[in-house]
Amino acid sequence: MRAFMCEVVAILTQFPVNFLKNNDKRGISLEYSSNNTVYRNEILGPGEYGVYLGAQYNNVSENSIIAYQYGVYVGGQRNTIVGNNIMENWGRGIYVGNSFNMFVENNIMNNNEGVYIYSYGQNNLFFHNNFGDNTKHVNYYWSGIGNSWNSSFPVGGNYWSGYEDKYPTTMELDNSGLWDTPYVINENNVDYYPLMSPTKPITRKFTAYNNIKVEICSNSSISEFQFNTATKTLSFNVTGSSGKGGFCNITIPANLMWGDFSLFINGEQLEEGVNYTKTYNGTHHMFYVTYTHSEHMIEVVSTEVVPEFSHAVIPLLLMSITILAAALTKKRIFGRQNF
């Protein structure tokens, strides 16, 4: 089914709970229209623009905008983009081409570029957004453009995946849930109060082996994901504000790990039904783990895992290739003799 573009020229309109899919160019276009609310739509590509804002005073909230060249294109001023899932867009999740817009509590994840700022994109405000696993979180037309990437203390700024790898010695700032080291985008764009953990639970995908992925949904910051076939162990770190409750829901494909499972936190074995629950749906093992922050290492150990490519197989493969080559050579010689 192919949906048509919604182009709006009226004012004070709303778009609630719609499903738009396979739009060749634009999902919802507000090119000359102001004071609209685009609310709770599923806007799925592929296409060029998921939501196109060419005017001002529009509100785009609680939408899922997926698989476009530009998830949200902001060409006007004083628009509010809040609470959206802007994900898996192959170009830019958000394109900002003008000033005085506000971006709050969006999940900006798995895009090629999370946010792209063009030359007129100045004096915009970004805070409480979750930047997760974008190829590049923020890119600029030129670094002299300035925007604000946090609210005041203790409200804070944004969550950035990869932050702990970039700033490994960072610490929590005054038990605030904020890191004490600013997140530097460039010399004119700095998040001075980056968040320790997402503003709401987010799902991240990690490649464990070949193309087999593990999904972790959590309200914690996830870092240092590893999968070790030799020890049959999957491990990662969870981080959040000290004393606050944390959880993670780990979904592991059954062709990656199977058999009997044991879970550990900071090296201590957890008790099923007390510290975690386990379910199985026929294709995936799912573990729901709870804990109290700050930082912990979680390990999932199984009795069986996907086998590594054994070095013992290599001589067998070479022998098979040699036998096959000899057989083909013999066949060609026999063919010439009978010609």
Image (spheres, rainbow, N blue to C red):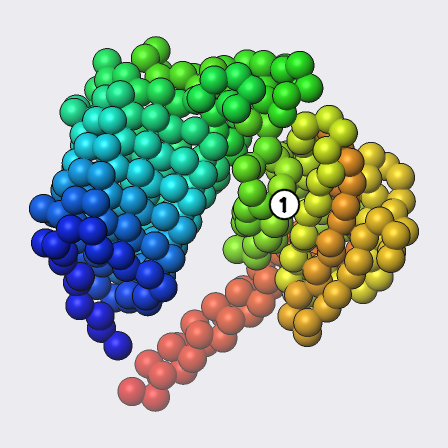
113 or 43: which is nearer to us? 43
**Is residue 263 positioned above or below 338 on the image?**
above
**Residue lying at 62% horizontally and 41% vertically, measured from the top left:** 219
**Is residue 281 positioned above or below 199 on the image?**
below
Q: Looking at the rendering, which quadrant does residue 196 occupy?
A: top right
**Looking at the image, which residue sits at the far front?**
12
Q: Is residue 99 visible?
A: yes
Task: Decide if residue 16 is on the left or right side of residue 129.
Answer: left
Where residue 222 appears, as percent x and y from the top left, is 62, 37
Amino acid type for the residue under numbered disc 1? Ser
Where residue 312 appears, as percent x and y from the top left, is 70, 55
Q: Is residue 136 visible?
A: no
**Residue lying at 77% horizontally and 46% vertically, measured from the top left:** 290
How many marks the image carries: the answer is: 1
Give the quadrant of the C terminus: bottom left
**Residue lying at 40% horizontally and 23% vertically, measured from the top left:** 149
**Residue lying at 17% horizontally and 61% vertically, measured from the top left:** 6
Q: Which residue is mark 1?
A: 218
Asked which secondary structure carries label 1, the reply is: strand
Task: Decide if residue 266 is on the left or right side of residue 30.
Answer: right
